[in-house]
């Protein structure tokens, strides 16, 4: 192993992380370095995904430092995230990363040893260290100077390039998990149709293929972590608007879905959206990610809701012909006294005024991807204290029930449920979301009059989604 070193570690990269673009660059550099030092493709994707997950979770305006280095004995690649303020990783992110990379170590400043006799305030800061062993053959031929040169040789990547790279990783991971699951299901069908003697063989094969079963579990965790990168990690805080959202993936053995949501401040108010790419497949998840990012980009340009649908319809037909999606967009005007709705074939949003009767706002247009014109957005007045609910069909659709009856049941549950959006989302998931066959999104808002001159505070973190049983 050649190259300049300091002690037992040879530094490769030290970079600040304080924006989403920095997180994208960190993930991109992790793929470059881990490939160059000889880690296998599975560990390359795991480490890049872990740094993306932690980077998004810990992202603040204050700078966090990321550092890459190579350890000599034993030969290993090390990634280090370090900060000097009160931020802490969420339990969900740290758990997901540790499952992917058990060699992850988190240390908060409060865990550091303090002088036993001198009282002091808890020190600020923390660090997360991830170590990946380098295969022996790769360690012998490793040239650290060449690896460092690779980091500075690439041209800057766009957000689309980064999104496509994440999509390729998602596709590869899910294809592997899908193939392994299909093989396990085939073996199970064959074995369960045979007699007791073959069942003994099945027990033998289960022991023999234990590593395959464990690998499928790891790939499923990786797939969920990658899928979360396509969804917002925070909800904006707008004056007079209380927001809460829940995302619940379908049962573990079903295909990955295309449900998504968005919330973003625009020049004309707060935009809320819930949508669903039609179908359940690896490609559906990728189409979902592209639509969600495009919606956010177009919304920031200040287009009205029906124009956003027209742009997304054109984009889907141009780049993903044959695919369709539903999408409902609600734009809440500053002051929260009026909202505008444009709906491309999605379930209608529910509006409930204080003391009033729940009513669905049944404005509809064609699905995205059909190339058909979309009606102009319809406006509705909003009374102070009104509640708004948007869901995907996984919450209410079942094989043996009438959709209108389920919508009526949902409206009654909202009317009788808590006014606070967080509590309402949790209660609706408990009542309707047991063992879902499809992904579920529940998006709730409570609207109060607001001083439109006041600036919105910093974004809030999205509440942790519940995992399937």
Image (tube, rainbow, N blue to C red):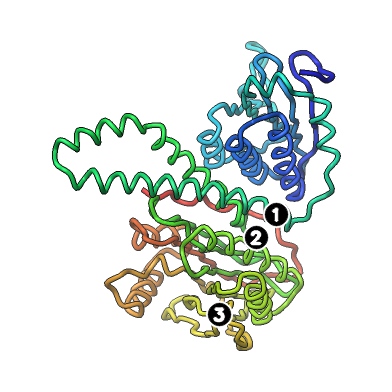
Q: Which residue is mark 1?
A: 458
Q: Which residue is mark 3?
A: 343
Q: Nearer the viewer, residue 119 or 321?
A: 321
Q: Nearer the viewer, residue 434 or 101?
A: 101
Which residue, as the protein is rendered here, is positioned at the far top? 117
Q: Do the residues under discs 2 and 1 have CB atoms within 8 angstroms?
A: yes
Mark 1 and mark 3: Cα distance apart in space: 29 Å
Residue name at image x 74 percent, y 30 percent: 68
Q: Do the residues under discs 2 and 3 have CB atoms within 8 angstroms?
A: no
Residue name at image x 55 percent, y 63 percent: 260
Instruction: Determine the secondary structure under disc 2.
Output: loop
Could you tell me residue 132's position as x and y percent?
62, 27
Q: Do the residues under discs 1 and 3 have CB atoms within 8 angstroms?
A: no
Q: Which residue is mark 2?
A: 237
Instruction: Determine the secondary structure under disc 3.
Output: strand
Sort mark 1 into few (<14), some (14-19) or many (20+) by Cα contacts within 10 Å: few
Q: Nearer the viewer, residue 290 or 308?
A: 290
Which residue, as the protein is rendered here, is positioned at the far left? 196
Q: Which of disc 3 and disc 2 is earlier in sequence?
A: 2
Up-down: is 189 above or below 259? above
Quarter in which the N terminus is drawn: top right
Mark 2 and mark 1: Cα distance apart in space: 7 Å
Q: Which of disc 1 and disc 2 is earlier in sequence?
A: 2
Indicate left or right for 121 with 421 as reference: right
Mark 2 and mark 3: Cα distance apart in space: 24 Å
């Amino acid at each position: 192993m050649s190259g300049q070193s300091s002690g037992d570690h040879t530094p490769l990269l030290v970079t600040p992380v304080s924006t989403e673009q920095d997180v994208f660059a960190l993930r991109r550099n992790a793929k470059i370095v881990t490939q160059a030092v000889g880690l296998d493709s599975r560990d390359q994707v795991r480490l890049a995904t872990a740094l993306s997950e932690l980077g998004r979770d810990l992202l603040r305006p204050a700078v966090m430092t990321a550092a890459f280095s190579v350890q000599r004995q034993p030969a290993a690649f090390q990634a280090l995230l370090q900060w000097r303020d009160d931020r802490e990783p969420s339990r969900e992110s740290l758990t997901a990363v540790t499952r992917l990379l058990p060699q992850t170590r988190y240390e908060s400043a409060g865990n550091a040893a303090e002088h036993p006799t001198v009282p002091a305030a808890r020190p600020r800061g923390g660090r997360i260290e991830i170590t990946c062993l380098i295969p022996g053959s790769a360690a012998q031929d490793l040239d650290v100077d060449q690896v460092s040169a690779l980091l500075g040789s690439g041209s800057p990547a766009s957000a689309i390039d980064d999104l496509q790279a994440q999509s390729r990783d998602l596709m590869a991971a899910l294809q592997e998990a899908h193939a392994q699951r299909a093989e396990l299901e085939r073996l199970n069908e064959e074995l369960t149709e045979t007699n007791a003697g073959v069942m003994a063989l099945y027990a033998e094969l289960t022991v023999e293929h234990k590593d395959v079963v464990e690998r499928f579990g790891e790939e499923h965790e990786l797939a969920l972590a990658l899928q979360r990168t396509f969804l917002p990690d925070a909800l904006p805080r707008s004056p007079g608007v209380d927001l809460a959202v829940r995302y619940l993936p379908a049962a573990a053995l079903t295909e990955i879905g295309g449900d998504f949501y968005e919330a973003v401040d625009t020049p004309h108010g707060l935009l809320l959206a819930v949508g669903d790419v039609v179908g359940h497949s690896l490609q559906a998840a990728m189409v979902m990610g592209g639509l969600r990012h495009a919606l956010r980009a177009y919304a920031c340009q200040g287009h009205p809701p029906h124009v956003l649908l027209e742009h997304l319809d054109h984009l889907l037909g141009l780049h993903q012909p044959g695919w369709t999606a539903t999408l409902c967009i609600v734009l809440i005007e500053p002051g929260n006294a009026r909202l505008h709705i444009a709906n491309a074939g999605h379930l209608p949003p529910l509006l409930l005024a204080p003391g009033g009767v729940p009513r669905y706002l049944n404005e509809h247009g064609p699905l995205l991807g059909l190339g058909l014109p979309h009606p102009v957005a319809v406006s509705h007045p909003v009374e102070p204290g009104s509640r708004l609910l948007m869901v995907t069909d996984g919450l209410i659709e079942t094989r043996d029930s009438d959709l209108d009856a389920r919508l009526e049941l949902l409206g009654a549950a909202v009317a009788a449920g808590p006014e606070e959006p967080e509590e309402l989302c949790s209660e609706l998931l408990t009542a309707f979301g047991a063992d879902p066959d499809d992904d579920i999104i529940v998006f709730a808002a409570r609207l109060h009059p607001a001083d439109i001159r006041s600036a919105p505070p910093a974004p809030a973190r999205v509440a942790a989604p519940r995992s399937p049983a």
